[in-house]
């Protein structure tokens, strides 16, 4: 998948999420199935997954290479990344990783702010995706808490699917 296609996919998936959440009644922001995240927590979780990726992509590429290494395999296609993520999720149902581990419930007053931040972080990622060289997209790796080390192209494709995954969860259960 080329850079423009990945950036456009992120935009499409993020826009679908924001449109869906924006159309929901404000009361739904604080609701979720018993024992599951609220709509607000889903939005916050996605924001928390965008931010470290954007921060990493802002670092000098030699720092990423030094810190995490280089890919030792070819880049997987989008569907393979999605399939691997779905497979890995089966083994950790109910677990939360990274900064989302102990997150609170965002207040209704934070709804528009979080949606705006999701839009900003999405646009940043789209810009950085288009700007980075294909060589760096395919050879530099970043760690993912569930998937392990992944080439940057894969982790950006995963991010697009991650948004879709949460959007589908919200549509099905909320």
Image (cartoon, rainbow, N blue to C red):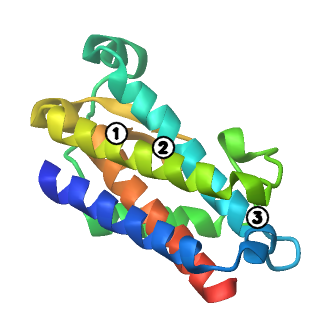
Name the image quarter holding residue 134: top left
Question: Is 60 situated left or right of 40 in this image?
Answer: left
Can residue 95 be seen here? The reply is no
Secondary structure, mark 1, is: helix
Which residue is denoted by mark 3 in the rendering? Answer: 94
On screen, residue 7 above or below 71:
below
Q: Nearer the viewer, residue 132 or 158?
A: 132
Q: Nearer the viewer, mark 1 or mark 2?
A: 1
Instruction: Give the x, y percent position of residue 75.
Output: 22, 48
- The residue positioned farthest toward the right in the image shown: 34
Instruction: Give the x, y percent position of residue 145.
Output: 57, 42
In percent of the image, x 65 and y 52: which residue is there? Answer: 44
Q: CA–CA distance between discs 2 and 3?
A: 21 Å
Which residue is denoted by mark 2 in the rendering? Answer: 50
Question: Is 109 situated left or right of 114 in this image?
Answer: right
Q: Nearer the viewer, residue 85 or 50?
A: 50
Query: In the rendered structure, which disc, 2 or 3, sits on the residue that comes first in sequence?
Result: 2
Query: In the rendered structure, which disc, 1 or 2, sits on the residue that comes first in sequence?
Result: 2
Question: Is 21 situated left or right of 154 in this image?
Answer: right
Q: CA–CA distance between discs 1 and 2?
A: 9 Å
Can residue 111 be seen here? The reply is yes
Which residue is denoted by mark 1 in the rendering? Answer: 124
């Amino acid at each position: 998948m080329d850079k423009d296609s990945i950036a456009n996919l992120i935009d499409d998936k993020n826009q679908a999420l924001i449109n869906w959440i924006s159309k929901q009644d404000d009361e739904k922001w604080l609701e979720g199935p018993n024992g599951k995240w609220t709509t607000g927590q889903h939005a916050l979780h996605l924001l928390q997954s965008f931010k470290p990726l954007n921060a990493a992509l802002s670092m000098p590429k030699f720092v990423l290479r030094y810190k995490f290494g280089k890919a030792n395999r070819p880049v997987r296609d989008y569907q393979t990344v999605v399939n691997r993520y779905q497979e890995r999720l089966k083994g950790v149902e109910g677990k939360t990783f990274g900064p989302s581990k102990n997150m609170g419930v965002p207040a209704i007053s934070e709804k528009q702010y979080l949606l705006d931040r999701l839009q900003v972080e999405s646009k940043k990622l789209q810009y950085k995706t288009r700007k980075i060289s294909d060589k760096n997209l395919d050879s530099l790796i970043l760690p993912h808490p569930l998937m392990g080390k992944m080439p940057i192209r894969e982790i950006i494709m995963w991010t697009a699917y991650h948004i879709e995954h949460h959007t589908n969860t919200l549509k099905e259960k909320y």
